[in-house]
Structure formats: C-alpha cells, structure tokens
Amino acid sequence: MSTKSCDVLLLGGGMVGLSIAHQLLERGLTSSITILDKELELGLHSSGRNSGVLHAGIYYKPGSLKAKVCVEGARRLRSWIEERGLPLNPCGKVIVPQRAELDGQLDVLAERGRTNGAEVELWDADQLRDLVPEARTASGRALWSPNTAVVKPISVVRRLRQDLADRGVNMLEGQQGFEAQPEQQQLTLNDGTQLSYGHLFNCTGLQADRVAQLFGVGDQYTLLPFKGLYWQLKASCPIQPRTNLYPVPDLSVPFLGIHFTPSADSTPVVSIGPTATPAWGRENYRSLQAIEPGMAAKNLGVLARQYLANRGGFRRYVHEQAFLALPPLLIRAAQELIPAVKPEHIELSQKVGIRSQVFNRQTERLEDDFLCMPGPSSTHVLNAISPAFTASFALADLIIDQALPTLNL
Ligand SMILES: Cc1cc2nc3c(=O)[nH]c(=O)nc-3n(C[C@H](O)[C@H](O)[C@H](O)COP(=O)(O)OP(=O)(O)OC[C@H]3O[C@@H](n4cnc5c(N)ncnc54)[C@H](O)[C@@H]3O)c2cc1C
C-alpha cells in the first residue's frame, strides 16, 4: 500500500479546483498540490459544458460573493486567455426587455452593474438596430455591456490543466471513489493508496454537497440540478447575431433566460439556450440512464412545494422557464428577442450542461450565491453556479483567503 502526501489536495479539477491550484502557485503559497478527479479527462462537467460567456458583473446583488469576484475575475481570466491566444470573441452583450413592463428592470440592472464595477450603457432602439438589426425591444430601450466576451470553455480547462501539470501540480485523474478520514487528514483511494493532506478543498461541483457531508459539513444543503439544453441557428439561417442577446432576467431565480450567443472562434455557430429544466439526476445529460429515482422523487416534492408556496416567485419560473425544452415554447422565447426566427432556422445542439444548483432545506429556498464552508482541515465550495467560470481566478483568491489562517503553509 503506498502513501502520498501534499500540502493542498483539490478534490475536483473543474475551473474552481484548477483556479485554486493556479492562485496557490501564483501567490507562492505552496507548490505541493494534488488535484484528484473522478474522471479520466477534465472538463466533462460544468466547466466544459457551459455557454462560455465571460460575464461582465451586471446581475449580482451588490455585496454578494458573485458581485465581489465577477468583474475582477473576468478581467484576469480574459488576460490569461488572450496571453495564450485561445479563442475569445470580444462581442459584448445586449439585454432587451421582452415585455414593456420589464423596462424598469433595465435601470435596476444598470445600477447594479455600475455598483459592481461593470461598464454599461442604456441604448435606444436605433442603437440596438445598428448592432442587431433583427432584434426587438418591447420598450424602445436596451442595456449594452461592452465588456462581455465569449470563450471556448473546454479549451480554457485543457490549457489550464496543462499549465498546472507543467508547473509540477500532481494530477490524479480517473479516481472513482475514496474513503475520507477527516480526523487523520487523509483519503484512502480505491487502489489502497493513502493520500494525506494539510488542507483539502472540495470543488466537486455537482457532487459537492455529498462530498461536504462526508466531512460533516452542509447537512442543510442538497443539490437541485437544472439541465441546460442548447439549440443553435442553422448555418443557412439568414439571421446570425454578432453579439450576445439576452432577455431581461427574472432576478428572483438564478437563471438568465434563454439567449443568443455567438461562438468564440471563427466557426459561425450561434447557440440558443440554455434551458433550465429539472434534471432528475446529477449527471443525467442525455439519456434516461443517469436518472436517480430517489433524488428525482425528493426533488419533485421540493419543486411542488416551491410552486404551491410560490417562494421567491417560483411560479413565474415554472410558467416561463421550466418547459422551454419543448421546441414550440423555446421558439416563442427566442422570438421575443428576434421575431423573425422560425422553427426551420434552428437545430438541437450537442451541447448540454447541468447546473450545480443547491437547495437549502432549512430556509426552503434555492441558494443564489456561492457557498464556501469551512470543515475539518477543509473548505467546501457549494453552489458554484454561473458566473463561477468567469470569476474563477478571483473566486479562488477569496476561497484561499478565507482558509489561509488555518492552512499552516
Ligand atoms: C448550462 C450552463 C451554462 C453556464 N454558462 C456559464 C457562463 O456562460 N459563464 C459562466 O461564468 N458560468 C457559466 N456556467 C457556470 C459554470 O460552468 C460553473 O460555475 C463552473 O464551471 C463550476 O466549476 P466547478 O469547478 O465548480 O465544477 P465542475 O466543472 O463541474 O468540476 C467539478 C469536477 O469535480 C469532479 N468530481 C465530482 N465528484 C468528484 C469526486 N467524488 N471525486 C473526485 N472528483 C469529483 C468532476 O469530475 C469535475 O471534473 C454555466 C453552467 C451551466 C451548467
């Protein structure tokens, strides 16, 4: 039986785990780092399956962790991507009200964005038409974000993994299962290897609540996964927006509404999505094989209670977003932004992701912000939903700073 040790063990090699390793190295805190992932390849979950939008920091409640890290994180990740010549489309983004009564939300978003340090401009219908001639604003106004960009998430994950491996980070991929001994600061892997650590960061995304509970952390949280399906405009479609086109979101739920997103590279693919449909399984991407019946039954109960109590305006989510995986409803939502889009213009994309959305059983609410919870010689990152990809470098610093007094480095 072999024994290995490291100062810092990162469980999960998505953007959050990789970025913590990156920041530990950048800050010279330690180079004794191991990243352990259950998959043979990194990027198979949210970090390789998202929209690739580098968000500008507009939506988030001032004072929230999301608001604290999004603008700075986007700036740093963008420079890192540009320095390496990875695909990046600096196309900006425009938000349009799909109904006249949503016009006032543009002012709320503009105010939030400015408070968070994002650059935003209120536009009239002519300015919108100049950029996206086919787009519609129900009120004659729109909100422009010049600093939003689109990247290719899987290329970012792969390059960051490679950079870290080149700098001596120990990568343990394909490790399906371990036994945790938190008191001994040790994991026993399936092949019997004992892995001891000074501090463990749990960055396991869709599994983070389960893993945290092995360390006695976060019993009140459970994953409520929401699937994001994407469609795309066919190459033959005469409408190909050159910028991100988003609806005014319902700020009471953590989904932004289906939107048009151009690709990061020269392939002219505009995606439409993602939907936000209950997923019935943590990694239930396509087929029905990965449905978890116990979890699905529990979550159906949670969703039904949310609907009946209308907590956080949940009924509006159900009526407007829960069924957008049905093509006629998706088309209707797309037409609210671009009326000329027709069913024959779109096709289902291969891309699909599942959000690691957490539900708090005590407050009976969906958590909106990132959760960084201390445990025995460990930190547990839950609810790393959007914009955790964008914000990852700055979020990593915040997580490290919180753990620093107990790190013993
Ligand atoms: C549909 C969709 C669209 C999105 N769009 C955007 C966007 O445009 N912009 C943005 O900023 N964010 C977006 N996000 C959010 C973003 O993708 C996530 O916030 C981010 O990728 C989270 O990274 P992570 O490292 O926490 O999780 P993940 O990328 O899921 O990584 C977790 C890793 O942990 C591993 N793991 C799990 N369990 C174990 C275990 N027991 N042992 C070892 N390893 C384990 C997994 O294999 C995985 O590699 C989107 C998310 C979705 C789902």
Image (cartoon, helix red, strand yellow):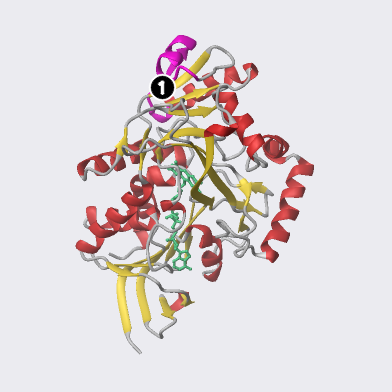
Q: Secondary structure at mark 1?
A: loop
Q: Residue at x 70, y 65 (%)?
A: 294
Residue 28: x and y in percent read 21, 57
Residue 385: x and y in percent read 50, 47
Q: Which residue is mark 1?
A: 120
Which residues are the magenta region? 115-134
Closer to us: 388 or 260: 260
194 sits to left or right of 209: left
Give the total number of marks visible in the rendering.
Answer: 1
**Would you say residue 67 sits in the magenta stretch?**
no
Q: Residue at x 23, y 53 (%)?
A: 26
Q: Is residue 370 visible?
A: no
Closer to us: 223 or 279: 279
Give the quadrant of residue 315.
top right
Query: What kind of residue is marked 1?
Result: Val
206 sits to left or right of 19: right
